[in-house]
Amino acid sequence: MSSSLRPPAQRPCQSCPYRRDVPAGIWTSEEYAKLRRYDADTPDQPTGLFQCHQADADSAARRVCGGWAGCHEGEELLALRLALLDGRIDAATYRAVVEYVPSVPLFSSGSEAAAHGKAGVGAPDEKARHLISKITRTRNDLVQ
């Protein structure tokens, strides 16, 4: 089976929920809740890879989230281990996640990122509204 997910981008995207400089409230509460679950001990983590929010769910441009890769210890991520074993990623993508060094400041945990992001849900500021508009123009799979 060939790899369907590409390695993380060199720089987490401008709307990455793990970035410290992204305004709160870009994503839904449900999206922010996902971040916390990857902080758990390895056996208790989700089995799905955290993918970049910039590509449609069915896009060939799908990649592993750079913020997720930079925030967490890759070798401790259950989803990463399973993806390599079942062929959803190749060895090069696995290694790229494990060795990822973020080029921008990230939150130190999914819980910290989620708390920041959720604080703006329901009342996003002007910068957040601008990013939301940009994302909805780019992503075909989001309800507008």
Image: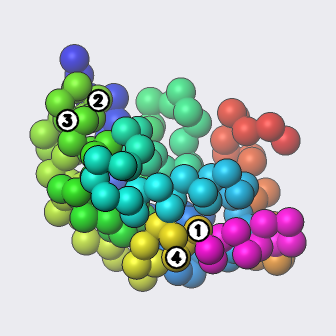
| Dot label at residue 84 | 3
| Dot label at residue 114 | 1
The amino acid on which the numbered mark 3 sits, given as a three-letter code, is Leu
Name the residue rendered at 34%, 53% in the picture: 8
Q: Could you tell me what secondary structure mostly forms the magenta stretch?
A: loop
Q: Earlier in the sequence, mark 3 or mark 4?
A: 3
Asked if residue 122 lies in the magenta stretch, the reply is yes
Residue extending furthest toward the top: 1
Q: Nearer the viewer, residue 133 or 108?
A: 108
The amino acid on which the numbered mark 2 sits, given as a three-letter code, is Arg
Colour scheme of this structure image?
rainbow
Name the residue rendered at 51%, 70% in the picture: 111
Name the residue rendered at 20%, 35% in the picture: 84
The residue segment tinted magenta is 115-124
| Dot label at residue 112 | 4
Task: Answer with left or right where residue 87 lies relative to residue 109.
Answer: left
